[in-house]
Amino acid sequence: DAEITQSPRHKITETGRQVTLACHQTWNHNNMFWYRQDLGHGLRLIHYSYGVHDTNKGEVSDGYSVSRSNTEDLPLTLESAASSQTSVYFCASRPNLEDTQYFGPGTRLTVL
Amino acid sequence: AQSVTQLGSHVSVSEGALVLLRCNYSSSVPPYLFWYVQYPNQGLQLLLKYTSAATLVKGINGFEAEFKKSETSFHLTKPSAHMSDAAEYFCAVSSNDYKLSFGAGTTVTVRA
């Protein structure tokens, strides 16, 4: 079955380190998204992509970057991790406007 | 720009009672609206969606929602709560850019 996966599922890192979270989908969706989930804020959009080599900033993009070299993957990089980036991160993809976004299982990141 | 307001961060209901979760949205264009459910330590699962067809939308697990344009609302209901309905619920709105804007979420607890 087609799916969307994230790795690692849990990550502990130290302040200042670079961290990359992987997102892989097998649906061949052009539209992919990264969100962070924090208590009281719901999900907030970090970055998104409408296709290969396309990337766009969301509402909380500072300190994060993404790249899209193929349709299946949208890795999220924290250039220099900060304690404020401790969160649960969700990747999603969406085939068209009439359909929903499909979410991965999430990555719990702790920055010490 | 679009946004979502969920009224009430916590709702407590008795088993068998009506569940009502409120969602109001703002959007400059006809919206696409979604309700998601999140169980502890899991990802988001789609409950139902409104994409300009019928205004009363039925979803999984006995949930339904009614789109009311005049009130800019998309409230979620279930006639009879079950213990398994205990979870966090998110309302989300999308316009023509494929992105989702989420409300802050409502946590539902079900009393035996």
Image (cartoon, coloured by chain):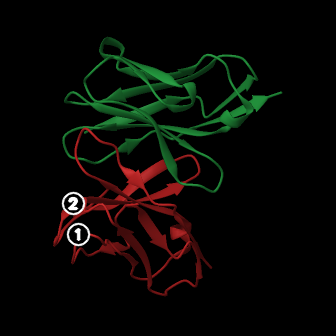
User: x and y percent of residue B51 in the render?
Assistant: 28, 29
User: x and y percent of residue A55 in the render?
Assistant: 21, 67
Query: Which residue corresponds to the image point at 70% horizontal and 36% vertical from the top-left?
Result: B84
Colour chosen for chain A:
red
Vertical relation: B61 (above or below) A103 = above
Between B36 and B70, the one lying in front of the other is B36
Q: Which chain is green?
A: B
Task: Give the label on residue B73, or none.
Answer: none
Q: Earlier in the sequence, mark 1 or mark 2?
A: 2
- The chain ID associated with circle 1 is A
Q: Amino acid at mark 1?
A: Thr
Vertical relation: B16 (above or below) B42 = above
A76 sits to left or right of A86: left
Evaluate if marks 1 and 2 touch, with contact meaning CB atoms under 8 Å apart: yes
Q: Amino acid at mark 2?
A: Asn
Residue denoted by label 1: A71
Residue denoted by label 2: A30
A22 sits to left or right of A88: left
Between B4 and B55, the one lying in front of the other is B55
User: x and y percent of residue B25 in the render?
Assistant: 36, 28
User: x and y percent of residue A19 in the render?
Assistant: 46, 82
